[in-house]
Amino acid sequence: MDKLYIATGQDPLRMTLDLLNNVHPLKGKDKDIKIGIKPNLVCASPASQGATTHPEIVEGIIIYLQQNGFKNIRIIEGAWVGDNTKRAFKVCGYEDLSKRYNVPLVDLKDDSWVTRSYKGLDLKVCKTVFDIDYLINVPLIKGHCQTGITCALKNLKGLIPDSEKRRFHTMGLHKPIAWLNAVIKQDLIIADGICPDPYFEEGGRPANLNRILLGFDPVLMDCYAAHILGYKPEDIKYIKLAQDEGIGRPLSDNTRIINIYEPDHQDDTRIIQKDKKYLKIVDEADACSACYSNLASALEQLNSMGITEKFADQICIGQAYRGYKGVLGIGNCTSSFKIYLPGCPPKTEDIIKFLKEQSNDQT
Ligand code: SF4
């Protein structure tokens, strides 16, 4: 029987401790093992905005580990291209956590990398990852404007260098995410579903889902995440690819979701995904997450002002446009276009300003 454990409520520290004390996932492990905790600190935005992992969850993990004699712990992360991990550690409350519990923070943007091959594909992975014995993945159950969702499988993308993050986008994102999970084993997953943004990875539209999940299988966890965010697991390509590689198993009649507070409770919470028709004016080719996400956010706001209807030209974005001539582009990769907005990635507010000016020129 495949199991996921769930704690519902609004006190992430208590809920995390209750989950760990209920399941005891490290029972029997050598107390000297090196443990890496990988939250999702994609950008410098507090957890209340729905983009990053609540520090109280990581605090609960650290308290549990230290109380049970595990002392060799570090928090590892590399923010997305265009943001600064150290700033994210500070803004998201991890600098404070590190001082209070004497747990080091490792900014993987400063790390060197090693190459691991899977089925002929070379993947660059930060060296620190292979210097730990037990990886605790602490993703968010969150929307993503390119892949639909992000949770356990995609959170490992924070463990590769920035150059490799960009390359993943040129490879279509889904396959390299699945392959990456074949070369990095996650031992435990504690997924934050307190108030994630169900639509965009950079947050700003938090939805109260009031839950934390504990499991061991990233495919199973991501199938649950897809379901609760209003998708079918088969809508998210990388989940099926990971399943086909034997990385985990999907939700099925054989899955038990155990609410540790209410074992008999049947949960039917589900988000209804918004129609994002305004994204149809975007021609995206190998865009980095931060770049595309900033454009999607800008268009969401411009759409609410009725401005997106005015664009006659497609808005192009992505690394595949490097050196190509076109009309209207976003980001340095479109610098050969007639009109483009510089930046790598450009900020949401700059994109809004730029596109407003362009829409005025088109009317
Ligand atoms: S400008 Fe190009 S390289 Fe820079 S973030 Fe955007 S897509 Fe990525």
Image (spheres, rainbow, N blue to C red):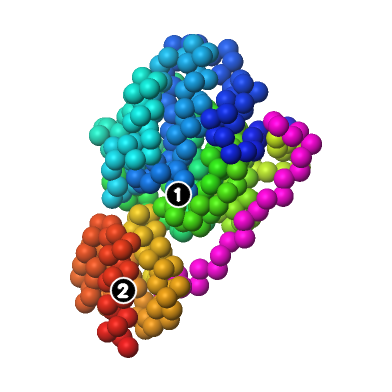
Residue 343 has which mark? none
Q: Point out the residue furthest to the right here.
A: 264
Mark 1 neighbour class, 10 Å CA radius: few under 14, some 14 to 19, many 20 or more? some
In the image, what residue occupies the spot 76% across and 43% down? 266
- Please, what is the three-letter code of the amino acid marked with disc 1? Gln
In the image, what residue occupies the spot 45% across and 43% down? 47
User: Percent from the top left, x then y, of residue 72?
Assistant: 40, 16
Q: Point out the residue furthest to the front here.
A: 11
Mark 2 neighbour class, 10 Å CA radius: few under 14, some 14 to 19, many 20 or more? many
Give 43 or 330, whichever is nearer the viewer. 43
User: Percent from the top left, x then y, of residue 40?
Assistant: 43, 40
User: Percent from the top left, x then y, of residue 280?
Assistant: 45, 73
Residue 266 colored in magenta in the image: yes
**Ligand 1 closer than 8 Å to the CB at disc 2?**
no
Vertical relation: 274 (above or below) 150: below
- Please, what is the three-letter code of the amino acid marked with disc 2? Leu
Vertical relation: 174 (above or below) 304: above
Vertical relation: 77 (above or below) 229: above
- Quarter containing the C terminus: bottom left
Q: Which span is picked out in magenta?
A: 260-281
In the rendered image, which residue does mark 1 sit on? 49
Apparent side of residue 180 relative to residue 229 in the rendered image (left or right): left
In the rendered image, which residue does mark 2 sit on? 355
Confirm or deny contact between disc 1 and disc 2 (CB under 8 A): no
Give 55 or 174, whichever is nearer the viewer. 55
Closest to the camera, between mark 1 and mark 2, is: 1
Residue 257 colored in magenta in the image: no
User: Percent from the top left, x then y, of residue 7?
Assistant: 64, 35
Compute the Cα span from label 1 to label 2: 25 Å
